[in-house]
Amino acid sequence: MISRARQLLAAALSGALLMLPAHTGIAAADTTSAAGKVQNIALAKTAADVKRVADYWKPEKFKHTDSYSPATPGAAAAPKSTSAAAAAGPAARTATTTRASTGSAGKSSAGRLAAPALPRKGAQVGSTMGKVFFRFGDKEYWCSASAVTARNRSVVATAGHCAYDPRQAKAADYWIFVPNPGPGGEQPMGIYVASSISLHEDWIGRGDYDYDYAFVTVHRGFAWVNKNGQYTMQDVGRLQDNVGGLGLELNRKPGTYTVSAFGYPAGAQPDGSRPYDGKTLRMCREGRTIWNAAPPLDLQKGVQLQACDFSAGTSGGPWVIDFDKDRKIGSLTGINSLTWDRDGDKRYDAVSSPYFDTVAGVVYQRAAAQSTPAKIA
């Protein structure tokens, strides 16, 4: 038995403390079974839906983003199961299970599923990272997120708990992505309304942190333009055309690569201090990764990056390998899911991600296969 002095304490973003046992490895995922476990939940599908969400996020609303709460995983246990119908929640959303073609994710070896891409418009520098804003119930929240290259040029990666709450069996409402937001709530690259979210059914049904990731298909972006004292929506095009996209790497075993984690930290450390205000994109220095686990959260195959003091607000921020600091692109291989206080000194010192294996690739492909209207405004 490990002595109490050597037990590692892990703090979820909500502040719950967890034991950290050893992890010996994981076999590559079975793509055939994975395809049947992907669910796609419709959010804003019609032009009227997009307009409803857009009207909620008028320019005045963005001036108060500092008052919104950074989303954190809840400490309460998630329900053990939920049906697709229950997942739809009171807003009458639809949830469908897909057995989509696995495509190039059909192989379980480590490798690239999608290559990084620069924007088609403007400067040849990526602006893939940003914030997502959304609502659960009557309260606004935000998280970190990133644009990922996809055939529909319209996919955002974030944490599962930044898109769906399994405790309430509810998808987020009024969900938008704002790339490269300004410190005062500016939206220089446009606003992108979510069309649908693709997740693994074990996040939806059990709150299993092995699957705490979501790939969100977004509509064409828009900007608010003041015409004669009235704000109108102006179409700015597809997400990837405007900001570029991170590539996607799967089945990279911890310890065999180094990674940089990004996000907008804002929440308090366990000791109550607040070194970050959530207004600036931060990067944890590039480091090596190790396996980790937390059975109370069903986390059996987590990946941990140490020497990182991220707090609430960074949830959903990208883990990037081969990051080009000049062009600001690289490849996604994870997302911020949980933060950890390994030595119990009441300061976060590590962050973890679900392991991006072939299963994550299948979820991504579902989002990349979704289509959206050619015009929204």
Image (spheres, rainbow, N blue to C red):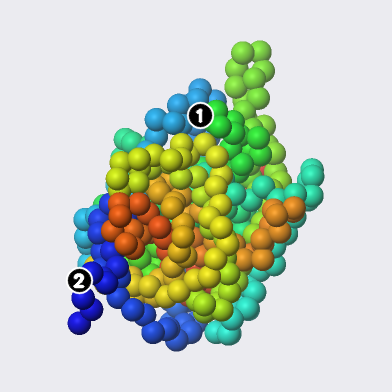
Question: Which quarter shows the C terminus?
Answer: top right
Residue 321 percent across, percent down from the top left: 62, 66
Question: Badge 2: how crowded within 10 Å, few (<14), some, or many (20+)?
Answer: few
Callout 2 amino acid:
Arg
Tally the marks: 2
Work out whether residue 8 or residue 166 is closer to the camera in this orientation and state it.
Answer: 8
At mark 1, the secondary structure is helix
Q: Nearer the viewer, residue 315 or 268?
A: 268
The quadrant where residue 348 appears? bottom left
Q: Quadrant of the N terminus?
A: bottom left
Q: Are marks 2 and 1 in contact (CB under 8 Å)?
A: no
Q: Please name the residue shown 35% across and 46% down the image.
A: 269
| Pair 2/1: label in front | 2
Left or right, 354 with respect to 88, comes to right
SS for callout 2: helix
Distance in Å between CA atoms under marks 2 and 1: 47 Å
The residue indicated by pointer 1 is 62
Q: Looking at the image, which residue is at 52% across and 77% down?
A: 255
Q: Residue 125: x and y, percent?
A: 75, 49
